[in-house]
Image (cartoon, grey):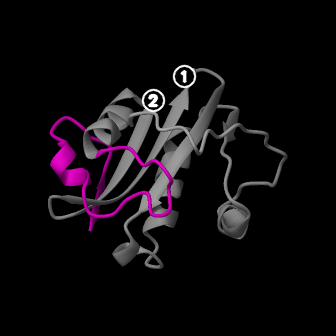
Amino acid sequence: MHYTDDLSTLSAHQLTGGFFVGWPDPPSPDKHLEILKSSYKVWLAMDGDQVCGFINAISDGLYSAFIPMLEVLPGYQQQGVGSDLILRMLESLSDLYSIDLCCDENVIPFYIRLGFTQTTCKSIRHYNRQNGL
């Protein structure tokens, strides 16, 4: 396993294998690649040439960042990959004042263990909309 923030040779083919478990309308590998390449910062966990985990951040680059996605393939979960990705991203964003994310209730303890504090977040999700991702 190795980690990289270099997306220069990343292809959609490397993003297959079961990301977005339980998502009602997951992005295709091509759209997933587009999302990552449009992000402010990205870290990938790689097993050989295959991506087995990723995290991305969007930011103004000056004051704040938001982490919209952290995903680890099911076969790589519970092995520290998610923690490693979060810690690498936090280091990459350490010069910013504010780093936020929203998560489901069941993973709050994971993020608290990694230094996040619980705050109130409001969001809108269009779960029933097929948005062509």
Q: Looking at the image, is 37 positioned above or below residue 120?
A: above
Q: Which residue is rendered at x = 70% and y = 58% of the image?
A: 115
Dividing the picture into quadrants, the one containing residue 29 is top left
- Check disc 1: other Cα within 10 Å, few if <14, some if 14-19, many if 20+: few
**Can you give x and y, in whole percent of width and height, for residue 103 in the image?**
67, 54
Q: Could you say which disc has been placed on residue 79 in the image?
A: none
Q: Which residue is rendered at x = 46% and y = 42% of the image?
A: 56
Classify the position of the N terminus by image quarter.
bottom left
Between 21 and 62, the residue placed more toward the observer is 21
Tell me the SS state at disc 1.
loop
- Residue 94, visible in the rendered structure: no
Question: Looking at the image, is mark 2 or mark 1 earlier in the sequence?
Answer: 2
**Can you give x and y, in whole percent of width and height, for residue 6 in the image?**
26, 40
**Can you give x and y, in whole percent of width and height, for residue 69 in the image?**
51, 48
Q: Is residue 65 magenta?
A: no
Q: Is residue 84 left or right of residue 114?
A: left
Q: Which residues are magenta?
A: 1-28
Q: Which residue is rendered at x = 31% and y = 44% of the image?
A: 28
What residue is pinned by disc 2? 40
Is the stretch drawn in magenta largely helix, strand or loop? loop
Tell me the SS state at disc 2.
loop
| Amino acid on which the number 2 mark rests in the picture | Tyr
Q: Could you say which disc has been placed on residue 61 in the image?
A: 1
**Disc 2 to disc 1: CB gap under 8 Å:** yes
- Residue 129, visible in the rendered structure: yes
Between the C-alphas of marks 2 and 1, the distance is 8 Å
| Amino acid on which the number 1 mark rests in the picture | Gly
